[in-house]
Image (spheres, rainbow, N blue to C red):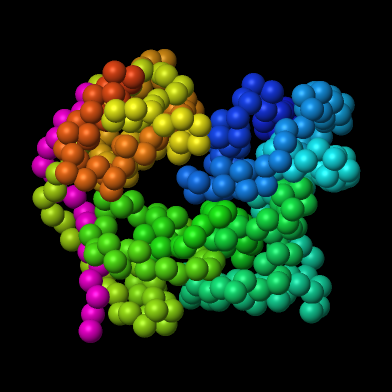
Amino acid sequence: MTEVNAETGDMELLRAYDQHGSEAAFAGVVRRYFTKHGVALSATALPAMLSAHSVQSAPAALAQSVTAVAAAKGAAAGASTLTLIQGALKMMAWNQAKLALIAGAGVLLATGTTAILWHHQVVKDGWQNRFEAVYKLKDGEDIRYIATPHIAERTDSYKEAFPVAFRLSRQMLPDFSVIKQDDQGALKWHNMSFGSQQTSLLEILNTTLGFWRYELEAPEELLNLNLPGDWTVREGAHRETLLAALEPILFQASGRRVHFEKRTEERAVIVARGLAKRVAKVQMYAEKPDGPGAANRNGGLQDILVAVGEQLNPPMVNEAQTEPPKDDSFEFDLIISSDSNFSKMGDRRTELTDLVLKNLTAQTGLAFTREQRAVDIWVATEQP
């Protein structure tokens, strides 16, 4: 079970709340925190969640008082303890939030509940049994699609996993979730999205199966196929296995026979070389950085280059290193502007892509070149 230390986790968020006034900036801090502890959020999940329920900020003295109380307790708090308290204070008016905050934070600081993984004592005919009957994988099953409408027990499971977030966000629930099941059969929240208008096949392939856009070759109409609902995935399952299991699910859900085939082909790639400067914040843009609310990615050099490749669409080959001293834990904060996404570049794609790479070079010191390489591509075709 993942444990979150109050001093290195929730206290970091409270300090960040004092330093970052905007919801967008704080959302980036929260996203990085969740990522470090095993829960991924879509690029728009937190901004949507915060702005949807924003009324006014809490008094500045509140963060200091909560910090002092938590430090006095000296307990390890779960991610839901204080991780989303500050976000929730942005969501709700202070008069509505303060009673729930005191009650929720006090209970969680005392119990050390974790928001990442839930364990429970199975009670006959309890909500846990009904939830697992729908969400838990059977032997030999690697992936399961749980279509909308969501069952009532889903609310119970989310409430148990994220009690304070659930309480202070006016019971706002994720529209789309990926739940991982480990070898012992335990379920944990892996990915979620709030305020989604639809859940496309492309998003499912990305968030559920781990495929980047540049690894896929398929008609856009097929990738935009809407499949609202949740997914349960067996932890450690190979992507090839999951794709094979996805085919009959897609036919049952949409009536469309989709087949995925792996091919190795010569494709244009972008190769990154050189020593990356150890800069905490990198702006990815062509002509103008976006303001507050821009998409955010956080991670090591490889994670950031993958994100760049996802935005520009040619695969990104990493032949770069970070500046010494070598520190594998060093992370970059990538702020992604809308004009750096290939789907919005139109006829200026080559020109704008070059501008994005030029701006990245100026900030990171890396050199980017276009080359032809043999890469693995997954081709999706629709069968009659």
Vertical order, 210 against 82 (above or below): below
Residue 361 pos. (x, y %): 27, 22
Give the residue drawn at x 27%, y 73%: 259
Vertical order, 323 against 179 (above or below): above
Q: Classify residue 98 as left or right of residue 28.
A: right
Q: Quadrant of residue 161?
A: bottom right
**Magenta stretch holds residue 284:** no
Range of the magenta residues?
367-384
Q: Classify residue 325 as left or right of residue 214.
A: right
Camera-side residue of 134 and 225: 225
Residue 342 pos. (x, y %): 27, 44
Give the residue drawn at x 74%, y 64%: 156
Q: Main secondary structure of the magenta part?
A: strand
Residue 24 pos. (x, y %): 56, 34
Q: Quadrant of residue 276?
A: top left
Residue 375 pos. (x, y %): 19, 50
Give the residue drawn at x 24%, y 63%: 218
Camera-side residue of 276 and 225: 225
Q: Classify residue 230 as left or right of residue 112.
A: left
Q: Is residue 71 visible?
A: no
Q: Is residue 312 visible?
A: yes
- Please give the count of numbered marks on the rendered protein: 0
Give the residue drawn at x 61%, y 65%: 185
The quadrant of the image that shows the C terminus is bottom left
Camera-side residue of 206 and 42: 42
Q: Classify residue 66 as left or right of residue 318.
A: right
